[in-house]
Amino acid sequence: MRSARASPRSAITASRGRGIRMNYPVWDVAFGAGLLIAIVAIVHVFISHFAVGGGLFLVVTEIKARRSQDAALLDWLKQHTRFFVLVTVVLGVVTGVGIWFTIGLIAPTATSDLIHIYVWGWAIEWVFFFIEITAALFYMYGWDKLEARVHQWYGWVYFGAAYMSLVVINGIITFMLTSGSWVKNHRFWMGFFNPTYFPSLLLRSAIAFALAGLYALITASVQKDAALKARIVRWSALWIVPSMAVMPLFGWWYIRRVPAAVWASARGPMPTGTEFAGLTVVFLAVTFALALLSLARPGRIPLAFSVVVLLAALGAMGSFEFVRESIRDPYVIENYLYANSIYVNPAPGDGGFDMSAVQNAGILQTARWIDVRTLNQDNQAVAGREIFRVDCESCHTANAYRGLKHYIELRQWDENDIQAMLGGLDLMHNGVMPPFAGTDAERGALAAYLYSIAPIAPGASLPADGKTVFERKCSMCHEDKPSDPLFENLPKDPQTMAAALQSLSSLFPLMPDLQLNDRERTMLAQWVNTQRGAQTSAALEGGN
């Protein structure tokens, strides 16, 4: 650990081939690279949290059964142990390898950086993982071969190793969202114990203990002995209910530690984070209600009911992971590496794949794994496709998950609109996208490609009113709220406002140079003025 602190850039430089920031081939996933990672990761996370909480559940339940001399409960626990090992060791390992395989192909730069930045952390975690797997197998095979005390000792070793794996992995996962002061000093512990580390650890611990009880409902529900089933369900509830009761507290603490700017973007015009946060609450409420409902008739819960409860919990876990991933945009590592694997700032002594270098030299000249190097009038769309692969495909597809075809068609943008919007990517949707990486000529080529997949259909309808103009041309960056600069700073007189809208970049320097025709400017000015009046009246009425 001392070497990481003494030479904070050494591990990072090693990951890029001694002073060259690496960029890697792009793996084309037709239905969406991000969606593939999400599917594999959510399943693995759901299993791995059970692996942590379930380990404690096994050993504590064994102690309880032996003290009460409950032979039936011990027999059930033996069966549950086999189920536990099958799920955590077999499925857990397979999906864990699946995560490394998918992120290594889809996000190789981020994967390389995370390995080299936390090389000793990963080494420690892999030791714990080896101990965890070994102890789990000894625990399963030792039921009838070991003394009770020795057998329980293996259970405690398993839980300790599994929980320490969570302790280490949690530091790396939270670092990606809130890198803290690591960006400035590159200190190992500054990144590891980042602002969201402890609330995330407690929240995930509560999730793990709740899942231990929820998984127990599965094996309990197939028992024919109603009295035994009732005892197991009541015991499981003691794991589920308290754990879920404290989750809102830890979740609130977690949210409070996320930077305000991050949540501002999550609540912006494209509120993916807050939408999935709502789904998380709904799924948690459903899971909690069903768990309580199981206590009404604990001896009669069927397998189908237990599966529904577990699926509701999977929905909650999946929604939470989508929240964490979506609010991290536009970064893979906060303030350090963008989602498209381009670094935010150049590092001393490094050249290569930084945003400023790419914008100066061009993506076609900077990216290594690309087929088109020059631009001309005949290859605009072809070159644009290459730029799309490098700049956009880590998050978007052409016509599938987060497909841009539908997005552009919905707003009926022409090629000039697309090119103008690409100039303000980092402003769109409250900053959930990185700035465009490339030259102005490459921006035009990307616009040509995007328009080729989503051309305006002949006879497409013109905007009928100012609201439609706003939705098509303004809603990507602005909200229909009194506090938005569009409503605060524009002139009050509609005619003066319409004239001012002729040059958006001079009106607001950061705005893309979007061209509105006379009709669009007039309708937009009238609508904005109407909205300002309505919002002012509503505010006055609310004050009264």
Image (cartoon, helix red, strand yellow):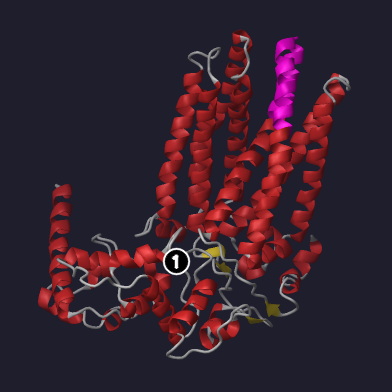
Please say if 437 is above or below 133.
below
| Residue at x 25%, y 60% (from the top left corner) | 480
Residue type for callout 1: Ala
Q: Position of residue 440 (x, y in %)?
A: 43, 86
Number of numbered discs present?
1
Q: Quadrant of the N terminus?
A: bottom right
Q: Image check: 261 left or right of 109?
A: left
Q: Is residue 196 left or right of residue 402?
A: right
Q: Is residue 111 visible?
A: yes
Name the residue rendered at 84%, 25% in the picture: 151
Q: Quadrant of residue 184?
A: bottom right
Q: Residue beneath label 1, please?
A: 398
Q: Is residue 347 left or right of residue 145?
A: left
Q: Nearer the viewer, residue 53 or 364?
A: 364
Please rate how many residues cluster around mark 1, counting C-alpha atoms within 10 Å: few if below 14, some from 14 to 19, many from 20. Answer: many
The image shows residue 36, relative to residue 305, as above or below, that is below
Please, what secondary structure does the residue beneath circle 1 have?
Answer: loop
Residue drawn at point x = 60 percent, y = 27 percent:
213
- Residue stretch rendered in magenta on the structure: 56-85
Q: Is residue 79 left or right of residue 489?
A: right
- Locate residue 473, reporting x and y percent: 27, 70
Give the percent coordinates (x, y) of residue 512.
34, 78
| 84 within the magenta span | yes
Query: Can you say whether 60 is above or below 299 in the image?
Result: below
Which secondary structure class fits the magenta region best? helix
Which of these two is toward me, 179 or 126? Answer: 126
Q: Is residue 281 magenta?
A: no
Query: Where does the image place residue 167, in percent across and percent down from the top left?
Result: 69, 46
